[in-house]
């Protein structure tokens, strides 16, 4: 389901700063190499939002859960300080081999550290201190409640957590939908909205994006 009228989405894209050649090439290569999965990539307006949030938070330490071919990690890393560090988590060598090439081409390979393995294990192994400036969750939806909890506790005050696909094609609105992904995202959305540790806004951008700022 298109939550936003496609004509509105096109207009939004046309009136946001455009993607550069590298991001356009990455999007095209992803469509050609992985036609069945390419829809997982963030759109350019969402990528622009991630870059802006990384800049606005002065992000030096960030975590991404769900790399795929690297579009969102490039957007985050580009907004970070030159000595910033983005820990990028994914399970797929295949998808992230494309990401690695584009990180190199973008001159960001020193700023991004790829960790292959279940993201929950990676997050749980991180130090417990609240030092993260920015985190982005965009992987398996059934683990969203767990990713949220591991990351929100590690955000510094003023740090920002971004969650993608929070509207699940609109299915979160239908209480009869028992699909595991939808249930997990709905549970996360309810948690975020009532969580005193953060102030949050949910944006009807693409498939829904929540921005939660740690108090
Ligand atoms: C929606 S895609 C990420 C899209 C990416 N943010 C982008 O803009 O291109 C989800 C990714 O999560 C990864 N993934 C799925 N289950 C995972 C898990 N348990 N731990 C880490 N990554 C996982 C998949 O391999 C896939 O690359």
Image: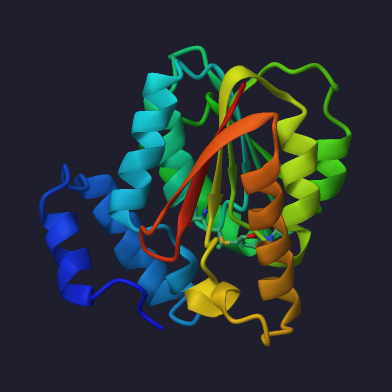
Q: Quadrant of residue 143?
A: bottom right
Reply above or below: 131 against 178: above
- Specify the quarter for ligand 1: bottom right
Q: Position of residue 115 (x, y in %)?
A: 72, 41
Q: Is residue 80 visible?
A: yes
Reply above or below: 39 against 88: below
Quarter holding the N terminus is bottom left
Q: Which residue: 52% across, 62% down?
A: 165
Front residue (pair 148, 170): 170
Q: Position of residue 205 (x, y in %)?
A: 36, 58
Reply above or below: 116 against 142: above
Q: Which residue: 72% across, 44% down?
A: 148
Q: Which residue: 81% across, 53% down?
A: 118
Q: Which residue: 57% across, 51% down?
A: 67
Q: Is residue 116 visible?
A: no
Relative placement, left or right, of 124 versus 47 is: right
Q: Position of residue 172 (x, y in %)?
A: 59, 73
Front residue (pair 40, 186): 186
Q: Furthest-top residue in view? A: 83
- Colour scheme of the rendered structure: rainbow
Relative placement, left or right, of 74 versus 4 is: right
Reply above or below: 81 against 116: above
Relative placement, left or right, of 70 versus 189 is: left
Q: Position of residue 33 (x, y in %)?
A: 44, 73
Q: Furthest-bottom residue in view? A: 176
Q: Quadrant of residue 208?
A: bottom left
Quarter holding the C terminus is top right
């Amino acid at each position: 389901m298109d939550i936003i009228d496609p004509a509105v989405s096109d207009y939004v894209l046309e009136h946001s700063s455009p993607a550069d050649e590298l991001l356009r090439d990455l999007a095209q290569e992803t469509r050609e190499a992985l036609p069945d999965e390419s829809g997982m990539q963030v759109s350019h307006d969402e990528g622009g939002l991630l870059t802006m949030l990384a800049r606005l938070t002065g992000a030096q330490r960030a975590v991404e859960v769900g790399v795929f071919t690297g579009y969102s990690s490039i957007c985050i890393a580009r907004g970070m300080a030159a000595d910033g560090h983005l820990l990028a988590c994914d399970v797929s060598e295949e998808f992230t081999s494309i990401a690695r090439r584009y990180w190199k081409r973008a001159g960001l390979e020193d700023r991004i550290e790829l960790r292959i393995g279940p993201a929950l294990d990676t997050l749980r192994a991180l130090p417990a201190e609240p030092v993260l400036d920015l985190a982005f969750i965009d992987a398996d939806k059934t683990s969203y409640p767990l990713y949220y909890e591991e990351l929100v506790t590690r955000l510094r005050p003023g740090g920002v957590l971004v969650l993608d696909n929070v509207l699940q094609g609109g299915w979160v609105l239908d209480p009869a939908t028992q699909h595991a992904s939808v249930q997990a995202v709905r549970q996360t959305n309810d948690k975020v909205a009532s969580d005193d540790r953060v102030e949050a806004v949910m944006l009807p951008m693409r498939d829904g994006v929540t921005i939660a700022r740690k108090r």
